Image (spheres, grey):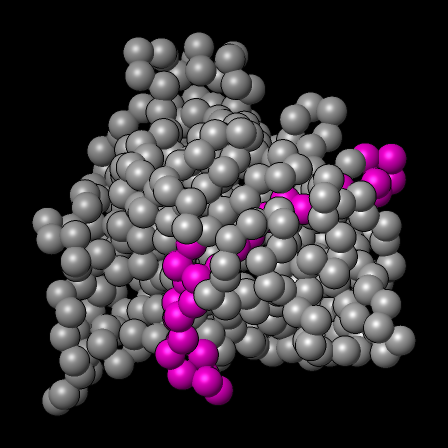
């Protein structure tokens, strides 16, 4: 992982250029350090199976594990300061980053939900975060913290399509694997703004894909867009529903207050929570595509599930410049991210955590994810694992450019 920092620029200049909150820090007159620091590190462990006694603990590291196979993704890392507790998930290479109040920080790593029999909790590491700086777990600073525009790495064009291999494990169904398309199949208007429909189609070779499918599992997706400043806007989830009279409709669970994701600093957490309402919406599909093209003619008929009462979206950036090789090619201009998508249904929180890499002008190229369920008020680490998954890009056609070979 290459850290997001401005090489050759002083911290003061960086603060002026990107408007960082808390840059530089200082003394508030009471002898207390003010400002924030971005603490970064890695979680690693030697793979082992628990036999006698407790399984071997995770290790918190300042540098990547010497053996990449020892990196532990999806570990839950807590950073405790005098005034706050921050939680992060480690990425594919074991890395994590968290923006915390400058000063003393206690860092602890908890094993992923599906590896609790292999690893136990790490020993705590004490570090002093330096205001306005990226601080490693050994106390070394690597420079001031930069900001990126999220949408530089999340293109939105009607007709964009991706094909990838996705696999995982489901508690009720066991291991699974499938090839899957995702397309930007059209647009809708929400509050006067354009929302793009990103959909996983379920049907025999829709024209927007124009190739034979292995399996397409659902006709669900998301509605995203950009505001006037270029910031990413998340409007909610969407389903294409076949009613009992055989008519097809797009039904969305829309956030009453759409989540507007600003440019983000390394380790910074953006969180937006909103109540949700259900709405049948009109969608302008891409040329040559009909609703019938997007669904299985013999598929399920019925109503969409009830929307959650609240929806919380949390997004974090944990690094940049990590090279990744996929079936669609090698990408180096990347950012590493984490998204936690939580829906409150009754007294249960259904949480999906996705960690992955976005490539400039391409979008997602690789990611892993967890879906857990926990009671309202319970901490994130107490959730019961329902499903885990991983995905790698095999082909993409984005903005008129092809990566990889079309299947």
Report the front residue among 210 and 266.
Answer: 210
What residue is rendered at 50% in x and 61% in y? 213
Does 396 sit above or below residue 2? below
Image location of residue 9, percent across then percent down: 36, 11
Does 265 sit above or below residue 42? above
Residue 43: quadrant of the picture = bottom left
Image location of residue 46, percent across then percent down: 13, 65
Query: Is residue 233 shown to the viewer in this render?
Result: no
Q: Is residue 185 magenta?
A: yes
What residue is rendered at 72% in x and 48% in y? 289
- Residue range corresponding to the magenta coloring: 164-193
Does 137 sit above or below residue 354? above
Quadrant, the N terminus: top left
Q: How many marks are shown on the rendered structure?
A: 0
Residue 321: quadrant of the picture = top left
What residue is rendered at 31% in x and 32% in y? 332
What residue is rendered at 16% in x and 80% in y? 49
The main secondary structure of the magenta stretch is: strand
Report the front residue among 81 and 69.
Answer: 69
Residue 405: quadrant of the picture = top left
Query: Is residue 291 shown to the viewer in this render?
Result: yes
Image location of residue 247, percent across then percent down: 86, 68
């Amino acid at each position: 992982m290459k850290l997001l920092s401005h090489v050759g620029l002083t911290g003061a200049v960086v603060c002026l250029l990107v408007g960082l909150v808390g840059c530089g820090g200082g003394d508030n007159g009471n002898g207390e350090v003010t400002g924030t620091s971005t603490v970064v590190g890695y979680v690693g462990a030697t793979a082992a199976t628990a036999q006698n006694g407790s399984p071997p603990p995770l290790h918190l590291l300042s540098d990547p594990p010497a053996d990449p196979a020892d990196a532990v993704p999806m570990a839950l890392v807590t950073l405790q300061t005098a005034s706050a507790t921050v939680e992060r998930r480690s990425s594919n290479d074991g890395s994590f980053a968290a923006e915390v109040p400058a000063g003393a920080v206690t860092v602890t790593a908890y094993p992923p939900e599906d590896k609790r029999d292999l690893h136990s909790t790490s020993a705590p590491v004490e570090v002093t975060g330096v205001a306005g700086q990226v601080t490693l777990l050994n106390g070394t600073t690597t420079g001031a913290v930069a900001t990126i525009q999220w949408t530089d790495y999340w293109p939105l064009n009607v007709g964009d399509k991706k094909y990838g291999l996705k696999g995982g494990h489901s508690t009720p169904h066991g291991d699974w694997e499938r090839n899957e398309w995702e397309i930007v199949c059209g647009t809708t208007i929400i509050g006067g703004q354009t929302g793009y429909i990103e959909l996983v189609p379920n049907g025999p070779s829709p024209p927007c894909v124009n190739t034979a499918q292995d399996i397409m599992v659902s006709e669900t997706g998301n509605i995203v867009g950009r505001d006037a400043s270029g910031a990413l806007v998340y409007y909610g989830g969407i389903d294409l529903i076949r009613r009992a009279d055989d008519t097809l409709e797009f039904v969305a669970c829309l956030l009453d207050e759409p989540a507007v994701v600003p440019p983000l600093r390394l380790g910074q957490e953006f969180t937006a929570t909103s109540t949700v309402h259900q709405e049948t919406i009109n969608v302008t599909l891409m040329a040559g595509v009909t609703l019938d093209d997007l669904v299985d003619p013999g598929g399920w008929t019925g109503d969409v599930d009830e929307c959650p009462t609240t929806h919380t979206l949390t997004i974090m950036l944990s690094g940049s410049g990590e090279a990744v090789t996929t079936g669609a090619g090698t990408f180096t201009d990347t950012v590493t991210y984490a998204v936690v998508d939580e829906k409150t249904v009754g007294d249960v929180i259904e949480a999906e955590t996705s960690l992955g890499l976005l490539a400039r002008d391409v979008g997602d190229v690789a990611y892993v994810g967890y879906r857990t369920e926990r009671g309202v008020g319970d901490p994130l680490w107490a959730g019961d694992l329902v499903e885990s998954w991983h995905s790698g890009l095999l082909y993409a056609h984005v903005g008129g450019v092809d990566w990889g070979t079309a299947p």
